[in-house]
Image: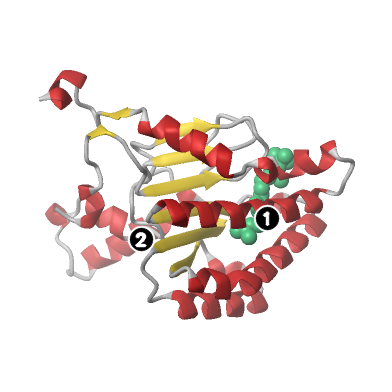
Amino acid sequence: MTEVSSQLSPGAAKLPRHLAVIMDGNGRWAQARGQMRIKGHQAGANAVRTIIKAARTRGIPILTLYAFSSENWKRPATEVSALMQLLGMALAEHVDELHSYDIKIRIVGDVSALSPTLQRTIAQVEAKTCHNRSMTLNIAINYGARLELTQALKQVAAQVVAGRLKLEDLDATTISQALYVPQDVDLLIRTGGEFRLSNFLLWQCAYAEIYVSEVLWPDFDEAELTRALEFYAGRERRFGMTSAQLAK
Ligand code: FPP
C-alpha cells in the first residue's frame, strides 16, 4: 500500500489528516461594510493566520488553502494585482513564524505565470521550510484541478512513451503521485455558503466529507473550525461499504 491509498481508512472519522479550505466570502464581507473588496482579502489573510495556527495546534498534518484559482485572473486587474501583492507580503511576513512552528510551506499550482518577484518569494519560503515536519501547509495559487490533472496525465503519458512505466502498471496511485497535491482530502470546508467545488482538488476530494459554512471567510475563527471538526468527527466514512461491514 502506498502512502496515498493507505489514507482511506474506513470507520469513524476523528481528526482529518488532510483538511482543505475554499476561503470564500471576502468580497461580500468588505461590501457589507462599505469597503473595497481588497479590504476583505486583507481581513481574510488574518483569518488564514488564525486557522493555520489552530490546525497546527490540533495536530492536523496537512492543510491546503485555496488562495487564487486559475480562473481568478478574470477578476478586475486592480483586484488581481492587489491579491498578488497581498499573497507575496503575507508569505514574506509570516515565513519566520510558520518556520518556528515547524510548518512546511508548499505553493501548489502553476507558479510559472506569477510575477518574478512573487516566484522569488515562493522559492525562498519553500526552501526555508522544506525540512519542517509538524504540518504541511499547501497554498494553492494559480491552481485549477483540471489544469493539475492535465499536467499529471501528460507526465504519466510521457513515462509510458519513454518506456519507464508499463501501461498495465498505471493505476490511481500513479495519478495521485503526479498531482501537485498527492494526498486525498478528508475534510473540505467551504465558507460563504455556496455549495460548489470551484475546480478545487477534484481528484483528491473523491471521498472527502464536505462542510459548507455560511460564515464569510474573514469571520471564520477557531470556534468555527471546531464546529467543522466536530461535524467531521461525527461522520462515518464508508468508502463504498455498508455500515454493517464497518461494524465487523
Ligand atoms: C474568495 O472570496 C477569496 C479569494 C479569491 C482570495 C483568498 C485570499 C485570501 C484569504 C488572502 C490571503 C491568503 C493567504 C494564503 C495569505 P471572494 O472574493 O470570491 O468573495 P465573494 O464571494 O464574497 O465575492
Along the line of sight, which residue is nearer the eye, 57 or 37? 57
149 w.r.t. 29: above or below: below
The image position of residue 239, as x and y in percent, is 25, 32
Specify the label residue 134 is tagged with: none
- The quarter of the image holding the C terminus is top left
Please report the residue visible at 63 percent of the width from the left and 30 percent of the height from the top: 214
* Rendered position, 248 above or below 226: above
On screen, residue 129 above or below 228: below
Neighbor class of circle 1 (other Cα within 10 Å; few <14, some 14-19, many 20+) is some
Counting from the top left corner in percent of width and height, residue 66 is at: 56, 51
Identify residue for label 1: 46
Query: Left of 190 or right of it: where is 246?
Result: left
Disc 2 crowd, CA 10 A, few/some/many (<14, 14-19, 20+) = few
Identify which amino acid the numbered label 1 is placed on.
Asn
The reply, left or right, for residue 36 in relation to residue 180 is right
Q: Secondary structure at mark 1?
A: helix
Q: Nearer the viewer, residue 131 or 180?
A: 131
Q: Tag 2: residue type?
A: Lys
Marks 1 & 2, CB-CB < 8 Å contact: no
Q: Is mark 1 within 8 Å of ligand 1?
A: no
Residue positioned 86% across, 49% down in the render: 36
Disc 2: which residue: 154
User: Does residue 65 appear left or right of residue 247 in this picture?
Assistant: right
Drawn side of residue 84 relative to residue 149, left or right:
right
